[in-house]
Image (spheres, grey):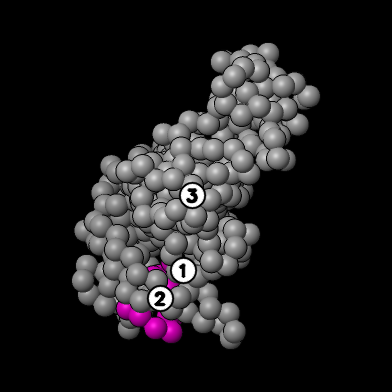
Amino acid sequence: MPKLDLIGVSKVYGDIRALSDISLHVDDKEYVCILGPSGCGKSTLIRCIAGIHVPDAGRILIDGGSVDQTRIEDRRIGYVFQDIALFPHMSVRDNLSYGLAVRHAQPTQITTVTNEMLDLISMRDRSRSYPRELSGGAQQKVAVGRAIATGSHLFLLDEPLGALDALVRAELRYELRKLASDLGLTVIHVTHDQEEALSIADRVVIMKSGRIVEVGRPSEIYLSPKNLFTANFVGETNLLEGKVLEIDNSRYTVDIKRHRLTVPGFGKNVNQKVIVSIRPEFVPLTPPSERGWQGQIRQATFLGNINRYVVEVEEGIEIISEVPTAEHSTGFRVGEQVSVLLEDSHMILFDYPENGLDKEIALD
């Protein structure tokens, strides 16, 4: 079963550095999602792995062996594109069996494997249908099945669900994950959908401007990111600029425009400029009280399971809060006074970026 190593992989197009010194290890049977803004190099990276593009520097190893000089067809990699690449003149069965036929597999093997794939993707009753007769989700399932039927165990999925409706996309991502687990596949799945990445990956790779910014388990990436770009890019967060006033062991008193917060952290100094990050779901609101920061609702948005509020507190600071609908079914209204409670156990302290906050969190 395959494991993958990327060592210092770089790719340049003229003045554009599409990939810059990418190093990554992917374990056998691991499901890794690569997440990042458009143009960050996600697709370029997996095309280099597949052999579609040739890196300008670095090495690509599969099971410890270099594939730098190996042809695309000999890398034994399954590749699924965002654009559903089925042969329109072929039935589902013929699409599934195509890869095996090209490799001159025995007819009995082709029949056996194709039937297994039809059962695996629950398409036995549509085996004689043509792509035009299938929904987008069904077509993509056939495309995945065709890739699996070739016998590959390393799969590259390039935005495989991007062209599908939201509901179909949500259903199919779990089917993909189950298939990978059941068959013991190693998968690298490129996506721009944060929920998709967090819900199915063993690890998430965050990319920006051709570089890997951070790698971690989904819970780590969301709840305890090590990088300010990650904190801002994945989900939504409040970023509050401040300065360290006092240090008591691993707790810092931070001044934010005359408001004081006590934040856990390490490695900071008195008078150092910092950024405090806290997710909106960890910012409860209550009717006015002596607790918390006092503010006024400037924007209220009903999102079904949550109510999203933008609250302006003193000194013009805006804080976003997300409150579960079940906890406050009537919701607050624009103009209402509230108390904003900031839960210190969910705050993360970052150094203030040398190049400024806006540049640090920019998508390009």
The nearer-to-camera label among 3 and 2 is 3
Mark 3 or mark 2: whose residue is earlier in sequence: 2
Location of residue 98 in the rendering, given as x and y in whole percent from the top left corner: 41, 60
Mark identifier at residue 244:
3
Looking at the rendered image, the quarter that the N terminus falls into is: bottom left
Q: State the residue at coordinates (74%, 31%).
A: 299
Taking the image as shown, residue 151 lies to the left or right of residue 316, namely left
Q: Give the vertical position of 141 relative to 322 (above or below).
A: below
Q: Give the residue type at disc 3.
A: Val
Q: Nearer the viewer, residue 33 or 159?
A: 33
**Real-space CA distance between mark 1 and mark 3, rounded to the nearest whole angstrom:** 31 Å
Residue denoted by label 2 = 21
The nearer-to-camera label among 1 and 3 is 3
Q: State the residue at coordinates (56%, 82%).
A: 13
Mark 1, Cα crowd under 10 Å, few <14 / some 14-19 / many 20+, is many
Mark 1 or mark 3: whose residue is earlier in sequence: 1
Q: Give the residue type at disc 2.
A: Asp
Mark 2 or mark 1: whose residue is earlier in sequence: 2
Bounds of the magenta segment: 46-59
Residue denoted by label 1 = 211
Q: Give the vertical position of 8 relative to 250 (above or below).
A: below
Residues at badges 2 and 1 in contact (C-beta under 8 Å)?
Answer: yes
